[in-house]
Image: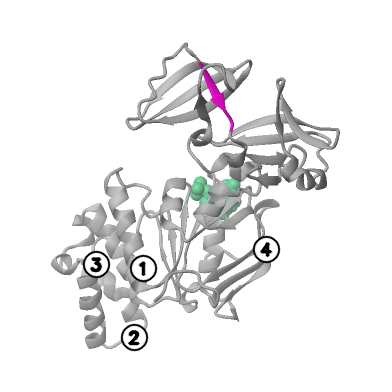
Amino acid sequence: MENKLGPERNVLLSLKGVHKEFNGFVAVNRIDLDVYEGEFLCFLGPSGCGKTTTLRMIAGLETPTDGEIYLKGQRITHMPPQQRNIGFVFQNYALFWHMTVYDNLAFGLRIRRLSPKEIDRRIREVAERFELTDVLRKKATYLDLSSMQRVALARAILIEPYLLLLDEPLNNIRPGLRELMRADLKRMQRDLGCTMIYVTHDQEEAMTLGDRILVMNEGRVEQIGSPLEIYQQPVNLFVAGFIGRPPMNLIPVQYEVTAEQAWVVWKGYRWSVNSVKEQVEKSKPERGLVLGIRPEHVRLSPEGLGIPALVEVVQPLGRKDILVLKIEDTLLQAVVYGGAKVREGAIIWVEVPLRDAHLFSADTGRAVAHGIG
Ligand code: ATP
């Protein structure tokens, strides 16, 4: 199945005003969401922001306090989990450890009363695809982590769910193997063309896996978009600061208009923002603006040009260095590539290219403009 989100994409799952409170505490705050057939959607957000609770409501393991959930146009808000045709894989895989891989895989199919012959046919087929043929007779408890994950996924896929939910399935896996399994998962999702929602608090994981990412914070949806959209056009200060490592530099600036010319002003430096004057004025910037610039966009400039900065820290990372720079009392991070040979304690000169900069309202935190000039 074509995995790209084309114009004639079908909505598989819809959340309408889905809300969840636990004893008055709002865990999920009126979420609206459409998930499209064949897409890989990642839920990304800090710990406790409501990702798992949202997933559990989709699975039917939790009932919304308010709002409705639709799967293939059918309202499923109160439907029991086993009737939803939604598969899920949790962090601990929840395998039956004393059973063989074969019996783990057969479990859901036996519940659905398929014939032993059909069950066997399906298991052989999926085992081949997931490279599990050699371990079918092994007890689950003796598997390595990668095989456990593949069994958990195979078991979820065997019931041919409309939708597969994964809650941090790679969380306990050592770095190195984790990246391999991630790549495996992406390939498998493409090959099968299935629709997946994948919960993670690891942005690298979300950026590499997701066709789209839903950024959550404090029970709310902050932004839904492709990884590139979220990186290039964060809708607010939360998303701007949350996405990207090291994080975007966020600098409070003043807004001034002199003789019809619009400027942002910071510590005696001024940048013309005429090209986005209309957007800025619409945002009523009485309380000022926040200028955002990603560390990878800060440029080193020849001595005497730009802004002088004291190099506080150099963090070498192989092909690139992360610099912590001090400009008067403000710290700014910059990423420089290719052995720029910057020394700690040195004074260097930097430039903030406005075409890569973002402006946010200091009042509401909302984005006002991306790329100036
Ligand atoms: P994590 O990444 O840490 O798993 P999360 O984003 O998945 O976090 P949730 O597990 O959905 O967040 O929890 C959201 C909020 O709801 C948290 O503050 C959590 O303590 C609270 N919460 C979740 N389940 C319950 C429950 N059964 N009873 C009370 N509070 C709960």
Q: Secondary structure at mark 1?
A: helix
Q: Is residue 52 above or below residue 154?
A: above
Q: Is residue 169 above or below residue 305?
A: below
State the separation of the CA atoms marked 1 and 4. 35 Å
Q: Specify whether 322 is left or right of 153.
A: right
Label 2 packing within 10 angstroms: few (<14), some (14-19), many (20+): few
Labels 1 and 4: the sequence-earlier one? 4
- Res. 202 visible in picture: no
Give amino acid for label 3.
Answer: Phe
Give amino acid for label 2.
Answer: Arg
Q: Secondary structure at mark 4?
A: loop
Q: Position of residue 110 (x, y in %)?
A: 31, 80
The mark closer to the camera, 1 or 3, is 1
Residue occupied by mark 2? 113
Judged from this view, the residue extending furthest toward the right is 259
Residue occupied by mark 3? 130
Residue occupied by mark 4? 65
Tag on residue 190?
1
State the separation of the CA atoms marked 1 and 3. 14 Å
Q: Is residue 350 magenta?
A: yes
The colour scheme used to paint the residues is one colour
Q: Is residue 320 above or below residue 101?
A: above
Q: Position of residue 34 (x, y in %)?
A: 59, 69
Labels 4 and 2: the sequence-earlier one? 4
> Mostly what secondary structure, the magenta segment?
strand
State the separation of the CA atoms marked 3 and 2. 24 Å
Q: Secondary structure at mark 3?
A: loop
Tag on residue 168?
none
